[in-house]
Image: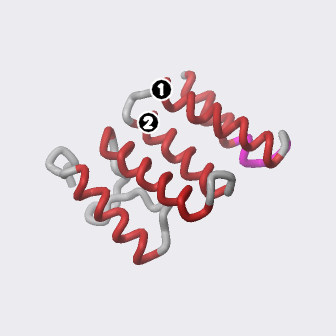
Amino acid sequence: GSQKCVHKACAIAAYKGRAKLTGDWFDLTCASCKRNYGGCLGVAVASAAWRAIKARRGRSHCDTYVALENLASAYGEAGDAAQQRDILLEVRAVIIQKCGPDHPKLATTLANLGNAYG
């Protein structure tokens, strides 16, 4: 599947429809080709996922920060390392504050942050 001919609004609507049906708001793959959405479309779908999960679970729920980290990854895949780093720094701070500096999730976030810095 080529994403160059996909309307952003259509892709987001398809994502939301599937997520409502399955309950899986973390599946950011195209329903047709099963690959992750990429570029600005990937950022748009990951943003929609983060907003939906935040609305359902609340700003301080762990799932909200998993979705936010997914959004950071989408920015990185789209070539926006600065935005990726900013989001990952926010996720890191929240994990340390809410879960403590020894939480296993922090290691993943720090690895992703290191990759974002190159």
Q: Disc 2, disc 1: CB below 8 Å?
A: yes
Q: Where is residue 109 in the image (x, y as percent from the top left)?
A: 66, 39
Instruction: Please identify the residue farthest to the left as the structure is shown.
Output: 5
Can you say whether 37 is above or below 15 in the image? above
Q: Residue at x 64, y 31 (%)?
A: 89
Please state if 49 lies on the left or on the right of 2 as rendered: right
Q: In front here: 48 or 39?
A: 48
Quickly name the residue at label 1. Answer: 81
Please state if 59 lies on the left or on the right of 99 as rendered: left
Q: Give the range drawn in magenta.
A: 102-107
Q: Residues within 10 Å of mark 2 (few under 14, many from 20)?
A: many
Quickly name the residue at label 2. Answer: 75
Q: How many marks?
A: 2
Instruction: Please identify the residue farthest to the bottom as the structure is shown.
Output: 21
Check the picture and name the quadrant holding the N terminus: bottom left
Q: Main secondary structure of the magenta part?
A: helix
| Quadrant of the image occupied by residue 4 | top left
Q: In front here: 82 or 60?
A: 60
Which mark is first along the chain, 1 or 2? Answer: 2
Can you say whether 52 is above or below 42 in the image? below
Q: Which residue is drawn at 67% across and 57% down?
A: 61
The amino acid at mark 2 is: Tyr
Please state if 51 lies on the left or on the right of 114 as rendered: left
| Quadrant of the image occupied by residue 58 | bottom right
Q: Which residue is drawn at 42% across and 57% down?
A: 28
The amino acid at mark 1 is: Ala
Label 2: state its secondary structure.
helix
